[in-house]
Amino acid sequence: MALAEELELDLVEISPKASPPVCKILEYKKFLYEQKKREKALKSKATKVIIKEIRFGPQTDEHDYDFKRKHAEKFLKEGAKLKAFVFFKGRSIVFKEQGQILLLRLAQDLEEFGKVEQLPKLEGKRMTMFISPKKK
């Protein structure tokens, strides 16, 4: 501590659990700045998961289905996760089977681009399914 005071710097404890504890004589503000810089660099290297959504109705037409399937293909090729869901309005909840068939058909069509993470599951008025992209 006397040496640190003599140099007009701070005595910083690096690892307190070691025996004896490891300390360094340095400028504390500079130490904090470099620590934040390291954490920021690590955070920027972490991958962010992007989730794209595609919405269907229980009686989605063939052309609309193809259009949305092509978009889903594009999303999976870009490396984004896909959340496909069928939204049931009003009394259309009667067509639960049609919604499930539609989502399973989509999963089958996108088999070469991604794998099903969660099978179709009914939550309230929407039936959702997750597809994650295949690794390159």
Image (spheres, rainbow, N blue to C red):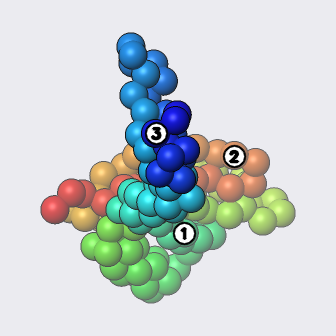
Q: Residue at x 24, y 57 (%)?
A: 134
Residue corresponding to mark 3:
3
Q: Label 1 amino acid?
A: Glu
Residue corresponding to mark 1:
53
Q: Quadrant of the C terminus?
A: bottom left
- Name the N-terminal-most of marks 1 and 2: 1
Q: CA distance from mark 2 to mark 3?
A: 66 Å
- Is any part of residue 79 visible from this angle? yes
Near-viewer residue (22 or 93): 22
Q: Secondary structure at mark 1?
A: strand
- Name the N-terminal-most of marks 1 and 3: 3
Q: Residue at x 72, y 61 (%)?
A: 88
Q: Label 3 amino acid?
A: Leu
The percent position of residue 60, horizontal first and vertical second, equals: 56, 74
CA neighbours of label 2 inside 10 A, class few (<14), some (14 to 19), many (20+)? few
Q: Residue at x 38, y 74 (%)?
A: 75
Q: Taking 113 as reference, is 1 left or right? A: right
Q: Label 2 amino acid?
A: Glu
Residue corresponding to mark 2:
123
Near-viewer residue (22 or 123): 22
